[in-house]
Amino acid sequence: MLIEGGLRLVTDGLRDRLPEVFDAIHRRLHATSAYPENEQLSAAESETIAASLRDVLDYVAGEQAHVPQRVSNEALREVRLAAHNGIALEVLLQASRTAQATLWQFVLEEAHRVLPDPADRVAVLRRASANHFAWNDAIARDVVLAYEQENATLALSGDRRRLATLQALLAGLPADTAALGYSFADSHVAALVSGVGSDALIAASARQLRIRPLAVNAHDGLVWAWWSWPRVAGRARTLLGGLELPAHARIAVGAVGEGLEGFRLSHRQAVEARAVALALDRRRVFYDDVVLEAHALHDLAAVRAFVLEELEPLGSGGDAPENNALVETMRVYFQSGQNAAVTAQKLQVHSRTVAYRLRSVEAKIGADGMNRDEFVVAVRLVGLVAAHDAPR
């Protein structure tokens, strides 16, 4: 068999499986990526995966091997967004390597399926590997160049200069903060605000709280904000929780932190709270309320396996809680301090219905099982798992 024909057999088979390959890459990136979760980055990542799969398969097949490779417009957009979000170049390159390693597993699998002769298969894979590495090397060079150019642009522009200063500060690098007009010696609360009306929300906070925030437009409507905050228990939650959200705005808030390290930590917490807000489609999230969910997102595959194992006796396959009456009842029951009357009111069912469901759960897992910490955690996290797995 001619090597070119074998390459076409393998790549044509992979093109037929593109949705499967795309999903595998997407899952692996979300399990390992250090990206903060936001709509723009998620969309750009998906577009980059789709465009890169198309281009690399053409190149592996030899259909464009004679043409100098250039990074796709979709990948360039993701690189620029990553630079605006302060994501390190190493993280970008690692994500690319992860995606290509996942694709190569599919190349090997498809070659074994369509090339039964071992000698043919070795020859084809040797050529495919050479083409694949050549494509990766060319694209990596363009990614590095685009990232460095975008960072240079950020450093030279007005508001972008402030963003570059904050990015350096958050990364622990030396930075001249005089132009920011903000004291880093105090306590701080950080927030990420996005959506239509985010600037208006920041302005309203200054009027209503009488605390002028440090705010910068990070990218595409996402605002990073900090308030120098008197450390009074509950005050941040009370006041920020009382701000009226514009119809399409979203806010994620970190905890109060002391000094420069608290400034950084509260921002990191706001980033993690935003990831939970996006996963669960919540518009206002405080990190202190979602610490468990935030940590769960760091290893969602392990959390998914844990939830499925814990809730399997209730007939849950990891679906949204509302699709399983027993799981939904337990979720609201635990949220309500194990008060059956309040649970019935929230679910809008008769109290006898709640009692029947509680007895059903007890019959399946026992009274001790209902009070196990692991069971309570699984009930709390099943919604996060279901939301993350739902088609987008």
Image: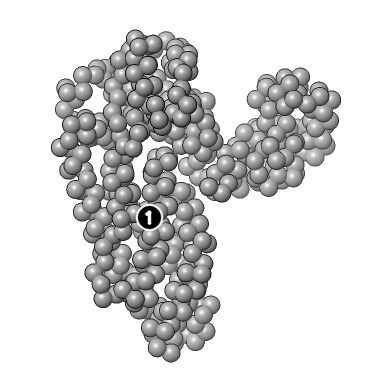
Given the image, on which type of amino acid does mark 1 rest?
Thr
Residue at image location 51% in from the left, 61% down from the top:
19
Query: Residue at 50% across / 41% down in the picture?
Result: 297
Residue 350's x, y, as percent?
Answer: 81, 24
Whether residue 127 sits left or right of residue 168 in the image: it is right
For residue 20, above or below residue 91: below
Q: Is residue 100 above or below residue 159?
A: below
Residue 388, above or below 168? below
Position of residue 291 measured from the top left corner of the image (x, y, whole percent): 50, 30
Instruction: Tell me if residue 98 can be seen.
Output: no
- State the image quarter where residue 351 is shown: top right
Of residues 307 and 146, the one nearer the viewer is: 146
Is residue 205 rendered to the left or right of residue 69?
right
Q: Residue at x 43, y 64 (%)?
A: 103
Viewer-side residue, 108 vs 83? 83
Q: Residues within 10 Å of mark 1 (few under 14, many from 20)?
A: many
Q: Residue furthest bottom?
A: 1
Q: Position of residue 292 (x, y in %)?
A: 53, 33
Quadrant hosting residue 235: top left
Question: Which residue is the site of mark 1?
Answer: 48
